[in-house]
Amino acid sequence: GAVVSQHPSRVICKSGTSVKIECRSLDFQATTMFWYRQFPKQSLMLMATSNEGSKATYEQGVEKDKFLINHASLTLSTLTVTSAHPEDSSFYICSARWEGVEQYFGPGTRLTVT
Amino acid sequence: TQLLEQSPQFLSIQEGENLTVYCNSSSVFSSLQWYRQEPGEGPVLLVTVVTGGEVKKLKRLTFQFGDARKDSSLHITAAQPGDTGLYLCAGTFGNEKLTFGTGTRLTIIP
């Protein structure tokens, strides 16, 4: 199956700092990448949809100035959590799609803001 | 806004037993996927169904898509401890965005 990687897998940062998470599709060119967050014992919630070379589309209630998404190439998307606060602590997961409806998910990044 | 309800929310059964989990939508799916997620990892795609009434099998797992394309079920035969995990249904509704269900947390007791 398609392989998607994320880096880092875990990150701890201090409140007020910014954190960048990378998502790469390793064996295919992704037409679209998606960013989700997942709180403990809950399901995945879509944050934004990202297409290469264009601005991301954010879901209602997601602050675009706080969660900056850059999709520089067909294999790389980044999510930057700016001025992180403890309530931003969560499991962030990206996915990638190139054709069809299936999305292939990365292993996730556990963010802890202290 | 589409709502995907999964039931049961939690299920704990003995190894060797059979089980079924359900996914119900308030709207008609364009497509539906089932994923399994283990703690600290991303979801892994199990199957995609698109046609009403469709049945797909993956070893001991049988996936059924409702005739009206508003519901789906996942049946596991002779459950094994390796089946333990969070099972998520997710659907598309006319666009590329996935809406995830509430999840079923399955525990198989050896």
Image (spheres, rainbow, N blue to C red):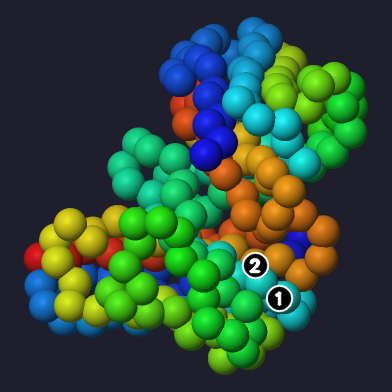
Asked which quadrant contains residue A11, the reply is: bottom left
Q: Which chain carries label 2?
A: A
Can I make out residue B40 in this image?
no
Looking at the image, which residue is at 45% across and 59% down?
A59
- Residue pointed to by mark 1: A30
The amino acid marked with disc number 1 is: Ala
**Tag 1 or tag 2, which sits nearer the N-term?**
1
Q: Which chain carries label 1?
A: A
Looking at the image, which residue is at 69% across and 45% down?
B92
Asked which quadrant contains residue A91, the reply is: bottom left
Looking at the image, which residue is at 28% across and 74% down?
A66
Camera-nearest residue between B24 and A109 = B24
Left or right: where B70 falls relative to A78: right
Place of residue A61 in the rendered image (x, y in percent of width and height, measured from the top left): 34, 57
Q: Name above or below for residue A49 compared with residue A37.
A: below
- Residue pointed to by mark 2: A96
Left or right: where B82 falls relative to A110: right
Place of residue A108 in the rendered image (x, y in percent of width and height, measured from the top left): 45, 61
Q: Name above or below for residue B88 compared with residue A66.
A: above
Can I make out residue A65 in this image?
yes
